[in-house]
Image (cartoon, rainbow, N blue to C red):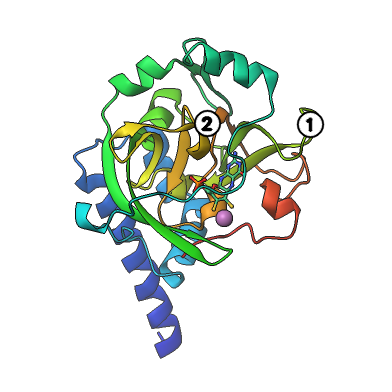
Amino acid sequence: MGDASRRNFLARGGAAVGLLALAGCRGLPQPQWLQDLLRSSEGLTRRVQRSFAGGNSLAKEFTKADIAPVFRANGTRNPVNPAYQAMRANNFQDWRLEVNGLVEAPLSLSLEQLRAMPSRTQITRHDCVEGWSCIGEWKGTPLRLVLDAARPKPKAHYVMFYCADPMGETPDAPLYYESLDLIEAVHPQTILAYELNGQTLPLQHGAPIRLRAERQLGYKMAKYVMHIELVQDFAHIRGGRGGYWEDHGYNWYAGI
Ligand SMILES: Nc1nc2c(c(=O)[nH]1)N[C@H]1C(S)=C(S)[C@@H](COP(=O)(O)O)O[C@H]1N2
Ligand SMILES: [Mo]
């Protein structure tokens, strides 16, 4: 083996071991769908990309002393969507998170059901591509657990997040959406957050549920998430680039 191919081999091996360790070290058993994913060629490609991008590591976590007194809001702060406003008026009792697409067991989860699942709390820094950062404490359900319950099919490669907020002044404007690949989706710091700094997730930060994917730039962290769909690819969805801002020119891969 030449030096270059040896380095390559070591990098791949290291990346795979790192991810398997991460996936395994939280005491979560590895269901069949995740074992299959990690062994697949799709999984290998993604692992190699992550190893170049700085790895299968955890994003830095901070202390309570680092938390910003006010967490800045950006983008939509109050969706101009009548159906959303009706749910909000009823304290989201009628809200359901739909999880479907390429899964064995589609789900429709109430807020109560999500809150009853094991949670993760993390103090992290949010980095917006516009050039500001903010540290906050997020609590939510690991997306991994929701996916475990839905059991992705082998062809599922991406997780789409469809949001309630029209990106314009009127309800008929295109709705915000985003996507992650499955490797990022099962990362331990990828959560469906329902609390910020110990409080119920405020309206301007995406009530009742917003995605936190802590190794990604801010625009990946979809607020007002209503529907999660597992797909093989997203070329046929909306503008075809995997997200509202991606359709407007941002990179799909937003790892930091
Ligand atoms: N649904 C939805 N999600 C969104 C946005 C948005 O406008 N709508 N803006 C994105 C951008 S660019 C950033 S920086 C963060 C802002 O999150 P915050 O308002 O909690 O700071 O949300 C992201 N997720
Ligand atoms: Mo952003």
Q: Secondary structure beneath disc 1?
A: loop
Q: Along the line of sight, which residue is nearer the eye, 15 or 41?
A: 15
Label 1 near ligand 1 (CB < 8 Å): no
Q: Along the line of sight, which residue is nearer the eye, 47 or 240?
A: 240
Task: Indicate left or right for 82 with 137 as reference.
Answer: right
- For the residues labelled 2 and 1, the Cα–Cα distance comes to 37 Å
Task: Indicate left or right for 206 with 75 as reference.
Answer: left
For label 1, the crowd category at 10 Å Cα-Cα, with few meaning under 14, some 14 to 19 and many 20 or more, is few
Give me the residue at 49% from left, 62% from top.
255
Q: Along the line of sight, which residue is nearer the eye, 233 or 57?
A: 57
**Residue position marked by numbered label 1 in the rendering:** 170
Q: In the rendering, at what x and y percent does residue 57 appear?
A: 32, 61
**Residue 85 marker:** none
Q: Secondary structure beneath disc 2?
A: loop
Q: In the rendering, at what x and y percent does residue 248 appear?
A: 75, 55
Question: Splitting the image into 4 quarters, where does residue 228 fall?
Answer: top right
Residue 63 visible in the picture: no
Q: In the rendering, at what x and y percent does residue 168 appear?
A: 76, 39
Looking at the rendered structure, the kind of residue marked 2 is: Lys
**Residue position marked by numbered label 2 in the rendering:** 153
Task: Indicate left or right for 38 with 60 as reference.
Answer: right
Q: Work out whether 97 lies above or below 140.
A: above
Comes first in the chain, label 2 or label 1: 2
Task: Indicate left or right for 98 with 137 as reference.
Answer: right
Give me the residue at 52% from left, 54% from top.
218
Give me the residue at 66% from left, 17% from top.
83
Q: Quadrant of the N terminus?
A: bottom left
Residue 211 visible in the picture: yes
